[in-house]
Amino acid sequence: LEMAERRGVDVMVVLDLSRSMLTEDVRPSRLERARHAIGGLLEGLEGDRAGLVVFAANAFVQCPLTLDHGAMRMLLSSLDAGSIPSQGSSLERALVTASSSFDADDRQYKVVIVFTDGEAHAGDASGAAADLAAQGARVYCVGVGTPEGDLIPLRADDGTRLEYHKDRQGNYVKSRLDEAALRGVAAAGEGAYWRSSVGGGELQDLADRIVGLEEKELGAERFTRYEERFQLPLLAGLLCFLTELLLSERARA
C-alpha cells in the first residue's frame, strides 16, 4: 500500500445563463461555445478542483469544488440560457458567490474564470473582482460573442425559432460583446481577458497560467501497487517443459 498526495488549485468557473447567451453571432450559439470551451478547459485541469457558478440576475453554485470533473461535465450539459427565473445579468453576484465557495483560510491557490458576453451587468463587478484579488484569487474573463452582436432568438422546446427578443417598447434587442467591461473586471481581479475563439488558443493560455500558480495539497490517496513476480514460476515452468521434451526424445530413441 502506498500514499500519493494530490496537489493543485481551486478553480471556480462562472457561466452566464442570461438570455443574451442564446445569441448566434458565434456558432452554434454563445452558450454552446462557452460550454464547449469549459469542457476543453477541464481537460487541462487534471489534479485541480473545479466548481461551477451560474448566473443571470441571481447567482447559484451549480457544482461545488470537486475533483470529479465528469460530474461537472454532466451538470454543464443540462444547463440552458434563460432557465434562471430572474433574468438580467449580475456578474457582481456571481463573483461574490464564487468567492464564498473557496476556503476562507486560503490566501492563494484560487482562480475564477468567467464565461460571459459582458453585456448590461448590474452592480459593481470590478469591485467584486478586486475583493477576490485581495483574498489571493485571480479573476480571468473569456468574452463570448462579437462586438457587432446579433438579435437574440427565442425558440420552442423542439428548437424551432419562434421570434426574436424585444424590449418593453416592442423593439428588437441586439446583444453585443462588451469587451471593455470584461477587461476592466479582469484587470481589477489581477487576471487577464481573452475573446473566445474557434481554435481555443485562449484555453491553452489559461491552462498555462493556472499551472504557473502555487499549488496546495488537496488530500492524499491510498492505492495498492502490485509487484510483478511471475518470472521465477515462469522460468521453472519452461525448465519443466524443456525437460519433458528431452525425456520424450530419449524415449523415442
Image (cartoon, grey):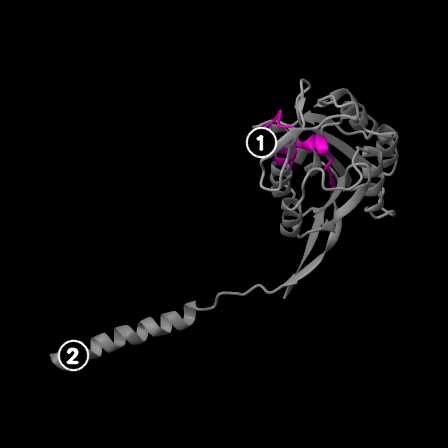
Q: Residues within 10 Å of mark 2 (few under 14, many from 20)?
A: few
Residue lying farthest to the top in this orientation: 148
In the image, is residue 235 above or below residue 148? below
Which residue range is magenta in the image?
12-34
Q: Looking at numbered disc 1 in the image, what kind of residue is underneath it?
A: Pro
Query: Based on the displayed image, in which of its 4 quarters is residue 121 positioned?
Result: top right
Is 21 included in the stretch rendered in magenta?
yes
Quadrant assignment for the C terminus? bottom left
Quadrant assignment for the N terminus? bottom right
Where is residue 223? Give x, y as percent: 62, 63
Disc with the residue nearer the chain's start (1 vs 2): 1
Q: Find disc 1 in the rendering and name its residue.
A: 28
Query: Based on the displayed image, in which of its 4 quarters is residue 244 positioned?
Result: bottom left
- The residue nearer to you, when weighing 121 against 243, is 121
Residue at horizontal 60 percent and vertical 42 percent from the top: 43
In the image, is residue 71 above or below residue 185? below
Q: Looking at numbered disc 2 in the image, what kind of residue is underneath it?
A: Arg
Where is residue 57? Give x, y as percent: 81, 36
Circles 1, 2 touching at the beta carbon (< 8 Å): no
Is 227 on the left-hand or right-hand side of 151? left
- The residue nearer to you, when weighing 80 against 249, is 80
Q: Find disc 2 in the rendering and name its residue.
A: 250
Where disc 1 sits, the SS reads loop
Asked whether the viewer can see residue 10, the reply is no
Where disc 2 sits, the SS reads helix
Q: Residues within 10 Å of mark 1 (few under 14, many from 20)?
A: few
